[in-house]
Amino acid sequence: MITWTQWSKEGLEEEGGFRDVRVVPPPMVTSFRKIDNEITVGFIGVEYHRKGGDIAEDVMSKLPSALGRFMLVKAQGGLRV
């Protein structure tokens, strides 16, 4: 089992019963941010229709804009990461 923080490692071991949990920090700088009431939904997918991107986009377009933002990233030409 791999997790990003020592805190989550301890929880997995003590409360989840997992053994040999390893901590691998995330590959980016993380920081705390102020929690607000804004909701941001991100959808990233290469196979847009198969993964339900069109459905997610349709649902988000029908919600009031006050509920949050919807970010959509479509890969071009079968991009694989």
Image (cartoon, rainbow, N blue to C red):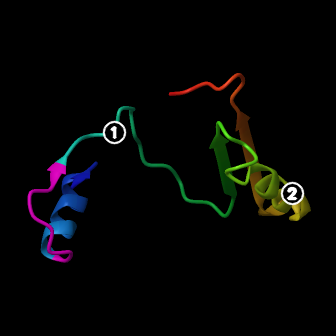
Circle 2 sits in a helix, a strand or a loop, which is it? Answer: helix
Q: In which quarter of the image is residue 52?
A: bottom right
Q: Please tell me which residue is depicted at 70% across the width and 36% down the height of the picture.
A: 73
Rendering coords of residue 64 (x, y %): 88, 64
Q: Please tell me which residue is depicted at 14% across the width and 68% down the height of the picture.
A: 13
User: Who comes first in sequence, dot 2 or dot 1?
Assistant: 1
Vertical order, 49 against 56 (above or below): above
* 79 with respect to 9 (left or right): right
**Marks 2 and 1, how far apart at CA:** 32 Å
Rendering coords of residue 60 (x, y %): 82, 58
Circle 1 sits in a helix, a strand or a loop, which is it? Answer: loop
Q: How crowded is mark 2: few (under 14 residues within 10 Å), some or many (20 or more)?
A: few
Asked if residue 20 lies in the magenta stretch, the reply is yes
Vertical order, 63 against 79 (above or below): below
* 7 with respect to 77 (left or right): left
Say which quadrant the N terminus sits in.
bottom left
Rendering coords of residue 40 (x, y %): 67, 53
Could you tell me the amino acid type at mark 1? Pro
Vertical order, 75 against 48 (above or below): above
Count all numbered tags in the image, as a single digit: 2
Question: In this view of the protein, which residue sits in the foreground, 48 or 63?
Answer: 48
Circle 2 is placed at which residue position? Answer: 58
Q: Do the residues labelled 2 and 1 touch (CB within 8 Å)?
A: no
Vertical order, 19 against 29 (above or below): below
Circle 1 is placed at which residue position? Answer: 26
Q: Please tell me which residue is depicted at 21% across the width and 67% down the height of the picture.
A: 12
Rendering coords of residue 29 (x, y %): 38, 33
Q: Please tell me which residue is depicted at 55% across the width and 59% down the height of the picture.
A: 35
Could you tell me the amino acid type at mark 2? Asp
Please provide the residue range marked out in magenta. 15-22
